Structures are given as structure tokens and as C-alpha cells.
Amino acid sequence: MGCGCTKESVKIEGKNFYILSRIAEGGFGTIDLIEDSSNGNTYALKKIKCENKNEIEKASMENKYYKQLNNHQNIIKLIHDDIIEESKTQGYLVLSVFQFYRRGSLQEELEKNLKQNILIKPDRVVKLFEGISSGLNYIHELNLAHRDLKPHNVLLSDDGQIPVLTDFGSMTEKVIEITNSRKSQEIEDWASQNCSMFYRAPELFTPKQGEKIDEKADIWSLGCILYAIMYNKGPFDYVVEKGDSIALAVANANYTIPTTIKRDEILINIIKKTLQFDPFSRESIPKILNDLNKIQLFESNQNEEIV
């Protein structure tokens, strides 16, 4: 059954959608649950308000990235997009229609688990992290970098088994050269606005002239996500709780692996190999995927022996 005619509606690429409810809102804009008036299918609608050409170009670039990366199961699918003018303010709305994930984000699950004092089961830890790594690898293969990878930006399929990367508002080309001090300051300022502090790589806190920011910054974030999947909190969450400096803790790779919680040593080693201060020392995604395959192979052999 569709919504009644009194429901607020919006037309996107010639198709009519009913707006059902507000899912989220913030500095980025709003996200609403919408329904296709022709068939009742539900989607998520992201609306970004733009007041000038530069803002329109930035929001449109995000949609361009979604279209470019639309063919991987671990990356969110852009269904429709459009730009409409608001009559009252004379501003514009950049509209993006995505597949709707009713289960929500990985962050929501981790927060729930933390309150209930439960952990994600070992086999699902591997499955989730493999999916996130695979999606990120696809982004890197297309010479792009996510730049704001964190549990908030990982959605979960209805059965909770397939992670889906989202929010490409901070995405850039894979390699950024820091050619002078001005560029260094620009990157530092940009990162402070666009990259979550808890998952931000050291080189984005203090970009140095003559160096570069590449996909290894995402690898750092990937290691932080694995830590969070395994322990329900990121490796640097405790820093704020203690009132210490996150930037200093990240610069020194100052984190601890809980000893009271038993986890797979291969996964713990992946955390250690990704959370390296030196970007060149961080593990590559193909090697990470190979390590995950070893875990799955071992578990498969164990199950066969049990049978």
C-alpha cells in the first residue's frame, strides 16, 4: 500500500516519492525515509542544501563518486540523483536516493553491544572486516581514497552479514602531494573538518611539506575499525575518557590490546600491522585479505574435523 495523497512528496529524475520520516540530520544535510509512489519500495533520501556554485559542485562530486563505485556489494548503491531549486530561499538541494538499510550502521550495533556487554562472534568479525576491506580495496583500485572510514560510515545488510561503505563526502584522489607549507596547512585544516579524529591517521594531523597523503591513511582507519569490531570501541576512545590528547596518542600509536578478551592472534596482528605510525610500514589490503582467508580456511578445516 502506498502513502495517502496528503503525504509530502518530492520528484527525483521524473519519479515521484513520498517522504515518510526523518532518519538523520546534521551539518551535512538531512536523510529521510522515502517511498516510491509507483511500487511502495522504500529508500533513503539524502538532501544537501547548497547556497552557491561551489557547494553544488562539491555535493555533485560526491554523487559522481557513488556512480563510479556503484558495482561492488560492499559499497552503497546510488539509485537516483537530482538537483532542484528551492523557491523560498533561491538555494538548491542536491538529492541522492540510496538503498535503505533498516538495520542501521555498524556504530549503532557496537554501541548496543557495549551496553549489553556482548561481543561480535569471531566468524562474523572476520566476515564483516573482509567485506569492509574488499570495498575499500575497490575504492583504492580506482585511484580514490575514502578519507573518513569509521563504523558510522559502514551500514549493515538486513541479516547483518554484509557491510556497506557509505558517505563519500570526504573522498579524494588516492595520492595528494604536499608541495609546500601552504598545502600542508590546507590539508591539516581540511582533515580537521572532514576526517573523524578517532579514526584519523597520524599524517593527517600533521601533514609535512615534501611528503604525500595516500591510501595508507585509509589503512590506519581500517585498523581502527577492526579494533572496534573486535572490542566494541575504537583504539583511541579511551583517550577522551581520560582527558588526554587524541593527536598525541595517535602520533605515538599509543593504544592497548585488551588482554582479558580472547581474540584471534591473526586479527590482533592485523591491528598491529595497520596501526603503524609510518604509512609505508602499514599492511596492504591484499595481504590483509590473504590473512583473513587463512582464518576462514582454518575454521573450515576445523569444522570438517568435527563432522
Image (cartoon, helix red, strand yellow):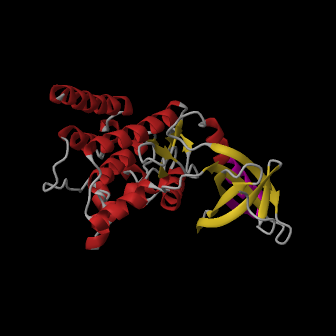
Q: Is residue 50 magenta?
A: yes
Q: Is residue 249 magenta?
A: no
Q: Residue at x 81, y 57 (%)?
A: 84
Q: How many marks?
A: 0
Where does the magenta region start and end? 47-61
- Residue 272 picture location, percent across and down: 24, 44
Name the image quarter holding residue 29: bottom right
- Residue 182 picture location, percent across and down: 54, 53
Q: Spot the residue most to the left.
A: 260
**Residue 274 appears in view:** no
Magenta region's main secondary structure?
Answer: helix
- Residue 180 picture location, percent across and down: 51, 47
Q: Quadrant of the C terminus?
A: top left
Q: Spot the residue most to the front.
A: 1
Q: Residue at x 32, y 33 (%)?
A: 288
Camera-nearest residue between 80 and 54: 80
Q: Quadrant of the N terminus?
A: bottom right
Q: Is residue 211 left or right of residue 273?
A: right
- Residue 208 picture location, percent across and down: 42, 49
Q: Residue at x 37, y 37 (%)?
A: 130
Camera-nearest residue between 191 and 151: 151
Camera-nearest residue between 261 and 150: 261
**Residue 68 appears in view:** yes
